[in-house]
Image: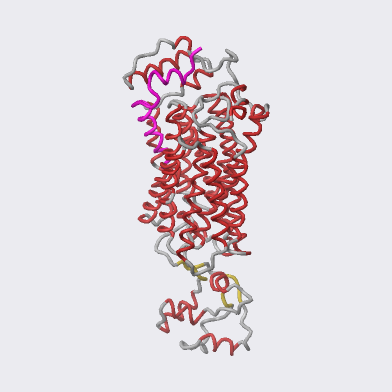
Amino acid sequence: MTSFDNVLEEIGQFGLFQKQLFFLMCFISVVFSPIDVGIVFLGFVPDFRCSNPAADELGRKCGWNAEEEMNYTVILPDDSVDPLYFSQCLQYDTNWNQTSVSCTDPIRNLTSYSNNNMTVTSCTNGWVYDTTGSSIVTEFNLVCDDSWKLDLSQSVVNLGFCLGSLFIGYLADRFGRKPCLLVSLLITAIFGVLVAFAPTYSWLVTFRFLQGLVSKGSWTSGYILVAEIVGLDHRRTVGVIYQVAFTVGLLALAGVAYFINNWRWLQLAVTLPNFVFLAYYWCIPESPRWLLSQNQKDKANEIIEQIAKKNKKPIPNTLQSLTANEETDDKQVPSFKDLVRTPQIRKHTFILMYIWFTCAVVYQGLILHIGYTAENVYLDFFISAMVEFPAAFIIIVTVDRIGRRYPWAVGSFVTGLACLVTAFIPEGKSWYLITTGCITLIGSTLYTVYIVLLTSCLSLFIFFIRNLGIMVCSSMCDLGGIITPFIVYRLSHIWKELPLIVFAVLGTLSGVLVLFLPETKGRALPETIEEVESLQKKD
């Protein structure tokens, strides 16, 4: 019997056909970035204060500028109350139109008038935002007591990722990679546009959830489609560059957001390219591996002939003996039970589920934590994205020389140690913080990309459950994304650096568990259960 990997050696493992296909798929990775982390700009929180029309009128009469109005009409309490919260979320419950109020020291007049017993109240007239643009925060007033709604608006996207990964993975294994990819791209585009026109916060959250339900599936299905057509020797390059394309999307997002400061127009700008991808119907093939697994050998042979022609290679004489699996000639229907049926597959599943969870919490958490203390959100976001390029270079240099398991573990340990060191660097040591912050991001990017290589490079699951296994494991990444905003912002109220301690523990444990996985360097995709079970024995 001849396997598809044997055929690729004859028709080209990464010829012109695969390169063109991969180039097209990279654009899907680019436009997925705004869906994943676009909330940084869509939900930008500017400086704000309570809106007080009476105090504003007094300010106009007295000729105050904005700073003088703040100094004269807002008084900060003692240390027993958070000064920032007091000035942004509370206001004095008083009549600023009293004739006794002076323009030089109005607070003293009012406290004398009320016997030093001025009460405070919430911002009954809304807020004034110090920005020329708009975000979902400024439009729907997601501040003060409603600030948790901003976290929720991002959590529902990750919830959609999590739920969608389960059923889209199943559909891709059952009905094919190409139909699943195109349908999910269409639905992603439709709900992305609806997000831009959401009239209320409730509709916004609903549309973002539905967009997240399918968008992660399109990103993963696009990668799997490419990885199943390229040869073994080039699979790691595909994995790294596909992640680099995501990083390019981060850089593009920062640039687009800098010039488009209205969140609705920004949402449209990053969504509309998804409609263009529907033209891929005429540009991309179905996965020959999937067709073979479904006993559609004639269709698989047609695509193999196209690949050979495009790569200017002769058509192999072994196509008639081509098969995807030596165990059975029947179609194999994937089942969740198959992920825990045998010892090695069960171990791979549980370890990878935890590592994907940790990957999301640490990677997204570090970005949120940087944004929490950022003075310039555009610059800081740009720098955090640029740091990922050195990490990709390190992977390309080491993955074929050292392998995947040990560099992956080192990346996890470096992330944990750097987080721990950063947490105890005193304030004012800005260069130390920048240095350790960059090291932390490089480490987190290293093991983020390595988990794509080791899991999505398809080497730890038998073929017919491969897409399902990857989707189930990556759904844990989305579960981590659901709770990450609450981990960062809630723990930061206790101690600003406490989230870094959590990241250090999670990252270090992840590095330990990586060592229990088999090395996949230079190994063909396993096609049978026996091949998966023998991976650890070969080590």
518 over 139 or under it: above or below: above
Segment tinted magenta in the rendering = 1-30
Scheme of colours in the image: secondary structure
Q: Residue at the spot x=56%, y=42% of the render? A: 160
Q: Residue furthest left?
A: 312
User: Residue 28: x, y in percent?
Assistant: 42, 38
| Relative horizontal placement of residue 129, taking residue 487 as reference (left or right) | left
Identify the residue at horizontal 38%, vertical 19% (top origin). 11
The spot of residue 120 in percent (x, y) is: 61, 76
> Is 14 contained in the magenta span?
yes
Q: Identify which residue, 535 or 482, lies in the foreground.
A: 535
Q: Is residue 158 above or below residue 488?
A: above
* Count of residue discs: 0
Where in the figure is residue 484, as x and y percent of width and height? 58, 52
- Residue 202: x, y in percent? 56, 51
Q: Main secondary structure of the magenta part?
A: helix
Which quadrant of the structure image shows residue 382? bottom left
Q: Nearer the viewer, residue 486 or 139?
A: 486
Residue visible at 63% across and 30% down? Answer: 345
Rendered-image quadrant of the C terminus: top right
Magenta region includes residue 184: no
Vertical placement of residue 536 versus 244, above or below:
above
Q: Give whichever of 505, 49 is nearer the camera.
A: 505
Q: Nearer the viewer, residue 218 or 435?
A: 435
Q: Please report the residue visible at 33 percent of the width from the left and 22 percent of the height from the top.
A: 311
